Image: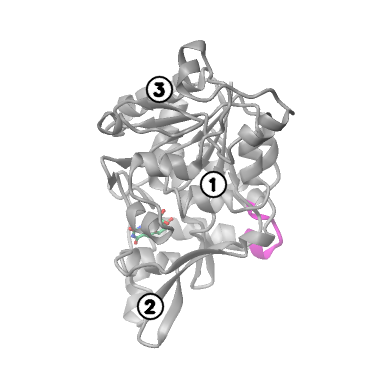
Amino acid sequence: MRVTALAGGIGGARFLRGVLAALPDADVTVIGNTGDDITLHGLRICPDLDTVMYTLGGGISAERGWGREDESFVVAEELAAYGVGPAWFGLGDRDLATHLVRTEMLDAGYPLSDVMRALCERWQPGVRLLPMTDDRVETHVVIADEDGQRAVHFQEWWLRLRAAVPAQAIVPLRAETAKPAPGVLDALGEADVVLLPPSNPVVSIGTILAVPGIRDAVRETAAPVVGVSPIIGGAAVRGMADACLTAIGVETSAQAVGVHYGGRGRAAATPAQAGAGPAEAPAGTAEGLAAAPAGLLDGWLVDTVDAGAVVPGATVLARPLLMTDLAATVAIVRSALEVAGV
Ligand code: FO1
């Protein structure tokens, strides 16, 4: 089975561990968010790609969910001794080697997708890890300040400001001219199932979808598309997805995020679900075109506390969604495959 997943950082990586455990023989492609990427001390850092690589490759810090296990921060301490920041971005000594190799390869002219392939030679994550694009896209956040407003890098907003300063806008800079990285559109078109893990719907999944061509590839793939809500009972499970959803005017609820992604309005996967969403209008007819909502989802997993959620055009399935351990995550993956009908 060919599985393609769009993934952000920590939540997405944990979900993917469940995908690999549930489908040990599947051919899994991960399309990773690069909007979180930042250049510090001349080094290119790709937090979400590295989090997936380390988590699936066995190098992740279990305690932090990002960066390396058995990490030290001596170089960061030395930088601080020189008064060189930013102190708010934890640069680990082992992690630095990844940024040094990546920066060296980028400076030599290798595209990011080749760099990640090379880094994954070491880590063997068990998935094909593709950046959403090889072009430079960075998420910046517009906030109010004493002079009116200014833009800060997403990482500064996320880590120094803890997303506590309202975002007036969240902008994936230069997404509009970015091209999907090699293999991304094929991975979406040729998949047997496409998964949207419980990553941040705005700055992770949303940023990936902002690369021209990717949203349409999800919308048009023959594969069933199933998402997993990152919001349980009106609260973000981790991170500060609520601050991001508020910034784009979306209520922090499982239903609102599902509606934000939108249902695809296709015939339900199995007759049992036929009653759950609008039957597919004959393809190619006026109704067919009119009936096809602009959405992405055939299935939307919500937690049992959100069982009443409705997403027009998608089948909603309520199951426990807390990824408390690998077994729980495997059960969530199995539920996603159930609603996908695969
Ligand atoms: N997240 C933090 O909460 N604090 C940090 O100091 C931090 C440093 C860091 C360094 C490398 C890296 O790959 C990820 C890092 N993260 C850190 C996570 C990073 O901010 C992610 O982009 C966000 O968690 C959103 O996905």
Say which mark, if any, is on residue 335: 3
The magenta-colored residue range is 105-112
- Is 110 contained in the magenta span? yes
Tell me residue 46's x, y (percent).
51, 57
Q: Tell me the residue that label 1 is attached to.
A: 32
- In what element is the residue under mark 2? strand
Q: Nearer the viewer, mark 1 or mark 3?
A: 3
Amino acid type of the residue tagged 2 in the rendering: Ala
Seen from the viewer's position, the closer of residues 15 and 165 is 165
Residue at 51% from the left image edge and 17% from the top image edge: 341
- Residue 177 has which mark? none
Disc 2 marks which residue? 144
**C-alpha distance separating marks 2 and 1:** 30 Å
Q: Quadrant of ligand 1?
A: bottom left
x and y, in percent, of residue 11 in the image: 38, 43
* Mark 3 close to ligand 1, CB under 8 Å: no
229 sits left or right of 337 in the view = left
Indicate whether residue 241 is drawn in magenta.
no
